Amino acid sequence: MEYSDQSNTDEQIRRFGIYRIIEHLALIALFVVLSVTGLPQKFYYLGISQSVIVILGGIDNLRLFHHLAGVLFAVLVIQHIIANFIGVAFLRWEPAMLVTLKDAQDAFQNVRYYLGLDDRPAQCGRYTYKEKCIYWLIIIGGFQMIISGLVLWFPVTATQYLPGMFIPVSKMVHTSEAMLIFLLVVTWHIYDSVLSPDVFPLNKSIFTGNIGRKQMKRLHPLEMEEKSEAVTAALSGPPGHEMAEDYERMGT
Amino acid sequence: MRAVIRIICIALLLCLVLPAWIPGAEVFAQDRTETTTSKYCIDCHGNKGTVKKFADGSFVLAYIDSHAFNKSVHGTLDCTACHQEFSTGSHPERSFRSKSQYQIMASRRCRDCHSDTAISSRSIHVALLRKEKAGEAIICMNCHSAHMMSRAGAGTVAISEEKNCMGCHSREGMKNFINGEMISTRVDAAEILASPHKDIGCSDCHSGFSAGDHPKNRFGSKREYRHASAEICRRCHYDKYSKMAEGIHYKMLSVGRLDAPTCVDCHGIHAVSSPERNRLSIVKKCAECHRAVYTAYAQSVHGGALLNENNRDVAICTDCHSSHSMQATSSNDFHDEIPDKCSNCHSNQVVMGKYGLSTDVVKTYLSDFHGMTLSLYRKETWRHYGPPPAMAVCTDCHGTHDIARVSGSDMRQMKSKLLKRCSSCHPGASENFPDAWLSHYRPSFTVAPMVFITEQFYRIMLPITIVGILFLVLLDIWRYCKNR
């Protein structure tokens, strides 16, 4: 937390609070369980799917695990939405995950940078456009998954209020959206946070809560600039947890 | 001189004894017995084509193969020993109404030497003697031939086994059972010759029976006899028999249900034919016991086509229930295998193409919840928590024996029943519920447009998104490499 000495490049900056760390860990666990129990149902005809189904004790058990994980995922998403509404409304959390025009500009600039038309990459704030993209995919896609999942889980109840056709539609949405989320997470998010040369072998900030100053400057330069004033202010006052608390207050 | 007489006597004695020691001596000895009378008879009766005609137009061959006769058990006898009215000087002209009348008369001559007591040592003769007492004449040559008879039990027969058996079994006769039932012992040789068994002998199936042996088997009832016959079939058709042993009919039999069908009940006894040749006959066979099922089947789309058009493509009993190892239809295994049975025909494009039917029915079923779950249940060789719940299969919606056409008024009727069928597993299902099933159709703009649009949206968006992202990732790596 002490990062007044700017010559120390290994200095760690507090970026995420324990709440976000637990949320992310829970999301990873549920993502893995839902993928392991969901994909074999979509690709049930493959040998590997059938092996997974047998190992997990048959299709009924597999569905039970999938339903349980689905319920926990729904709880996670809903508590996240409620907590953030409250946080933003009453606890001065900064709605940093909201998509702005700058995100589109950043994406555009990055493409230009990749193609050699610009000499520097997009300067991102607390969350890059890539992170926001994955985040909203999980939130919006997650709601689609929860609703379509409930329709598939309780088809008799669902068709008391909805036309019967919603069941095959839900199946289509559930399986296709799952594929979309799964593929984007394993390609883009895993590249961005694990395999990318910027962070390789792993961007540990979401697990430890801390980020190296150098990495912070490279990945989130605007946030770094924005907070240097706060750092200066903090230095003038008594050293302590203000910076960390400030970040934790920022919520998402 | 006395010495010369002695030598002549010894030589004569040797001439009498030696032939009995040298090979072929028997023939030689028998030939010696061919008397002048016999030679006289053979002069005419040795000509092939000599026949004796009877009033009714029937005839017997009067040709005698003297060589064969000499080798027969009666070879030592003179012709006149049996044909007593005839001699070198007398050949009376006799007329008979028919061949059988002649043979009956001739058989009486046999009985002069072969007394009733003597022939009673054979069970077949006992049966014949009983018939004779009842008024039926015995014709010895039906089994033993007229001139080429061999020694009984000598291991060879002068006539073929078929002729031997058919001598009696071509005529009407009855076999009695302990319970008083009777069956005809008459065998139609033409039936056997038309059957796949035409090249095998009687004793190949009726083991223990031969020209010399006719064991007397007593059975409690006709059904017992029929079931015992199945054991005969087992000797050659063991594969089918062992399959049958796994089936419901054998299980019925094993608990004493003699009404359970056995081989001959379906395949026939001597008129065995390949059942595939006549699929209608299979249905009719099953209908003998399963009458109610047949009535429903006859009105179904399958039964109607079979009975009215003799359509060979439609499913018959054995296509679904199998021909030998038929399972109890109440078993879970049987229920779960129904999609396989239907798909045998309904996923065959050649067969379905003839009637304009889609082979998608099986694929759409298997890719939906019920089909997918069922196929996975069937892969679970072990379960921790009891048998899996029943999944809807083809027959749960379409019916079993009363399967109707799924078009026109029949289709509407089927749909009206669908909610009831769904409700049996999904209690509380509303009227909307059956619409969840797309009736085997693949989504399109006309059928299930919502599903179709959703499907197309993801079909287009998903690859574009993933390819786009992969492109960005590659660009990122490329830029990193360039910058180094």
Image (spheres, coloured by chain):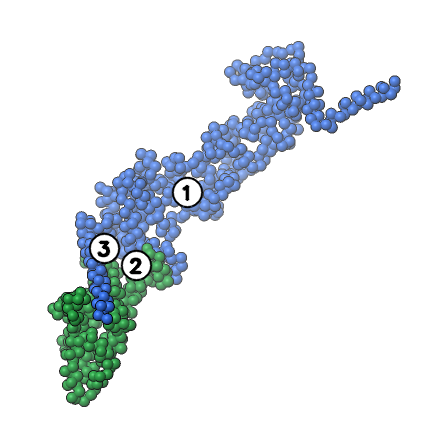
> What percent of the width, then of the height, locates residue A128?
18, 71
Specify the amino acid type for callout 1.
Ser
The residue mark sitting in front, 1 or 3, is 3
Tell me if B52 is positioned left or right of B314 in this view: right
Instruction: Count residues near mark 2 (Cα–Cα under 10 Å), then give few for <14, some for 14-19, many for 20+.
Output: many
For mark 3, give the secondary structure.
helix
Whether residue A22 can be seen here: no
* 1 and 3 marks in contact (CB < 8 Å): no
Residue under the point 37% across and 36% down: B280
Q: Look at the picture and state if B385 lies above or below B290.
A: below
> What percent of the width, then of the height, locates residue A172?
23, 57
For mark 1, give the secondary structure.
loop
Determine which residue is flagged by label 1.
Answer: B323
Chain painted in green in the figure: A
Confirm whether circles 1 and 2 share one chain: no
Which of the numbered marks, if any, corresponds to residue A41? Answer: 2
Which of the numbered marks, if any, corresponds to residue A168? Answer: 3
Q: CA distance from mark 1 to mark 3?
A: 39 Å
Task: Look at the image and give the colour of chain B.
Answer: blue
Specify the amino acid type for callout 3.
Pro
Instruction: Count residues near mark 3 (Cα–Cα under 10 Å), then give few for <14, some for 14-19, many for 20+.
Output: many
Q: Look at the picture and state if B73 lies above or below B443.
A: above
Instruction: Count residues near mark 1 (Cα–Cα under 10 Å), then give few for <14, some for 14-19, many for 20+.
Output: some
Residue under the point 37% across and 62% down: A55
Residue under the point 40% across and 59% down: B382
